Image: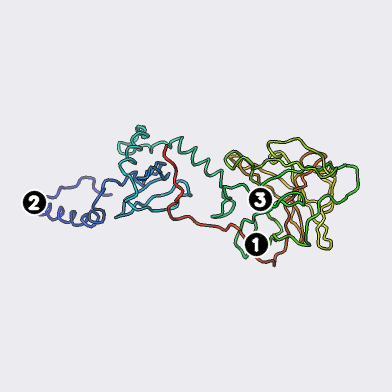
Amino acid sequence: MTNSRRHKPTGLLTTILLTASLAATAPAIQASPQHTTALQPDATAPHRTRLILKDGTYQVVMSYRVTGNLVRYISAERGGAEEEVPLSLVDLDATHRWEQRHAQAPTPNPNSDDQQTPPAIDPELLKEEADRAALTPEVAKDLRLPEQDSTLALDTFHGTPELVPLAQTDSDLNRNTGHNLLRASINPLSAAHPIVQLKGEASPLQLHVPDPVFYLRIGDQSVGDTAGTPLTVDTHGATSRAENDPSGGAATSRYVVVRADIRTNARLIASFRINLLGSGQRQEDVVETTTELLPGGHWLKITPSKPLDFGEFALMEVISDKAVNLGVWDFGIHPVAAENRDVIKPEARHRVNLERHAPD
């Protein structure tokens, strides 16, 4: 056991030790000639704070330190990624003032005179972080959903996960990645009959895995006034005239994947027995799904209940026990197809995000 009593150095020995100590610290002082006291908060006790920039915007960080002409920090918004920003852009004085205003007195530890309880996380920062994460949730490693209104399929191409934008298609609707509504009444007792005809024998979007997962953005005020707005058109008796549904039906609807019947230069989507959905009875060419509203209420996750075979399909919205949405999202399943256009790929974030937060 080491003796706890130690002798203090005196005389020449003290001088030698002091000189060695100063020499060891000299390079660190030269590396950062300015703001050498701005190494706060200490990385050993990480907590969320704001690194305020001179233009008034800020980054939410766990910790930061000044290294020469750079400020290196651990981002609280991007999963603890280490990033950096030029020191000339950082307002250290404003950063310290913000920390002092939001600092809370540490709770004394009765078992130790040296340890202190880490500062509590600011509820305001927690809420901001949760709101931002809900807008762009991560669905695979380094792969996040976009902020804009869209419908996407999670695919895998050559071992890499990708998000493929799906377009809502109908002869009476413009192609777009939003969520439009065109209701059609279906007689639950009638025989199967075509209700949607798609142009071409194959969809321009081909997925490569039999178990894709779909993500539907639910319209909200932040996306725009037209996002998720129902669309009712006159199809000369083919559909019922539906009253406007402000929600677009997205959050409360059911969804199915229907296999398309390929004809010459066309794909036909046939009606099915809506009343049998959820009963456990199998319907040919119809695959039921499970839905999950992701945290924050911005995205709906739609997962087919079983793998899909090769062929052409459409994701269809079931509005009620007697009505479906004729605006469908068509796609194919072909493992050897070429890569789709405009896909979203995984992106590891290491550099500073230029979309800074506006000042309060």
Left or right, 178 with reference to 201: left
Tell me the residue at 73%/36% (across/down). Answer: 244
Q: Mark 1 points at which residue?
A: 340
Q: How crowded is mark 3: few (under 14 residues within 10 Å), some or many (20 or more)?
A: many
Q: Which mark is residue 177?
A: 3
Question: Does residue 247 sit above or below 337 in this rendering?
Answer: above
Left or right, 222 with reference to 313: left
Q: Name the residue under label 2.
A: 11
Residue 191 percent location from the top left of the image: 91, 48
Tell me the residue at 63%/49% (across/down). Answer: 150
SS at badge 3: loop
Is the Cβ of the residue at disc 3 closer than 8 Å to that at disc 2? no
Q: Looking at the image, is mark 3 or mark 1 nearer the viewer?
A: 3
Residue type pointed to by label 1: Asn
Q: How crowded is mark 1: few (under 14 residues within 10 Å), some or many (20 or more)?
A: some
Residue 8 percent location from the top left of the image: 15, 47
Tell me the residue at 66%/43% (across/down). Answer: 292
Residue sitting nearer the eye, 163 or 212: 163
Residue 172 percent location from the top left of the image: 76, 49
Among numbered discs 3 and 1, the one appearing first in the sequence: 3
Residue type pointed to by label 2: Gly
Residue sitting nearer the eye, 335 or 261: 261
Cα distance in 3D space between marks 3 and 1: 15 Å
Cα distance in 3D space between marks 2 and 1: 77 Å
Q: In which quarter of the image is residue 313?
A: bottom right
